[in-house]
Each structure stands twice: as structure tokens, then as C-alpha cells.
Amino acid sequence: MTHRYMAEVRLRVPAGADISWIGDSLGAAARRVDRVSPGRQILSAVYVVDDGRLSCVVSAASREDVQRLLEIALLPSARVYEVVDVLARTHLLSHPARDLDPGVDPEVVEDVRHVSLDSPLR
């Protein structure tokens, strides 16, 4: 059974430095681990520049599996928390253009003529 975990790693990267190596390292570690023990998957990884923190959301069987994945990625030790999706599979996480209809809605076109500004925008 897999759970979702968030791993937080303190990782100071000089301002303006290329951080693509982080994604490359995590991707390589995930592929290596998946060959040995399938089921672990990196769902998200973000680097917070101002805080010097890397946060990863990982699907895995245990916290130890997440720690092992980060070790293989040659990242510093992390705090790992079990997490629960709050907005999973909702319209908030979908691409905004997905629901757009290529046709023109006549009501929207009709309403545009009635829009006016009472004063300049500031």
C-alpha cells in the first residue's frame, strides 16, 4: 500500500545558479529505485528560493522509502511527513484551458458592448 509523503530538504543554492540538477538527480534516483522496488513516484518537487528549501511530494510505502530515494539522489537528509490530498481531482488542479469551448458564446459577445468604464483605471 502506498501513501503520500512530503519531504523537506534544506538546500542552499546560490542566487541565479542553475537548479536543473535537482530534477535530474531526483529523476535518476526514482528510475533506479523503481527497478528494484516499484511503486515509489515523485509527484511534485519545488525549490523555495527565499527559504533555501526543497519540498517533494512522493508516493511511497513508507517514510524510509522516501529517505532512501533522497539518499540515492545525493540530497541532504530530509524531514518527511505523511500528507493527505486536499484538492486532489478537483477543478482547481486542472488546466484552465481544458474546459474552453472553441466556439464563441453569443451571450458573451452580446455583453461586451454593454461594458464601459466610469473612470480611468488606477
Image (cartoon, helix red, strand yellow):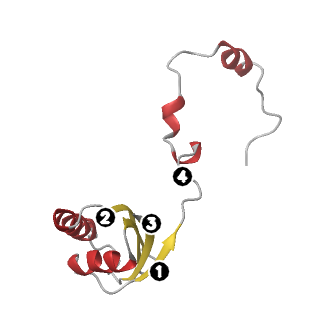
Give the residue displayed 66% in from the left and 16% down from the top: 109
* Count of numbered marks: 4
Disc 3 element:
strand
Front position in the image: 77 or 34: 34
Q: Earlier in the sequence, mark 1 or mark 4?
A: 1
Give the residue displayed 76% in from the left and 41% down from the top: 120
Disc 4 element:
loop
Label 3 with label 2: CB-CB less than 8 Å: no
Q: Earlier in the sequence, mark 4 or mark 2?
A: 2
Residue 34 in the image: state x and y as whole percent: 21, 63
Front position in the image: 65 or 74: 65
Residue named by callout 3: 4
From the image, state whether disc 4 or disc 2 is nearer to you.
2
Residue 8 in the image: state x and y as whole percent: 43, 79
Disc 1 element:
loop
- Distance Cα–Cα, label 4 vs label 2: 18 Å
Residue 52 in the image: state x and y as whole percent: 41, 81
Relative horizontal placement of residue 107, taking residue 18 as reference (left or right): right
Q: Which mark is residue 51?
A: 1
Residue named by callout 4: 88
Which residue type carries mark 1?
Asp
- Distance Cα–Cα, label 1 vs label 3: 23 Å
- Distance Cα–Cα, label 1 vs label 4: 26 Å
From the image, state whether disc 1 or disc 3 is nearer to you.
3
Label 2 with label 1: CB-CB less than 8 Å: no
Give the residue displayed 32% in from the left and 75% down from the top: 65
Label 1 with label 4: CB-CB less than 8 Å: no
Front position in the image: 1 or 11: 1
Residue named by callout 2: 40
Which residue type carries mark 3?
Arg
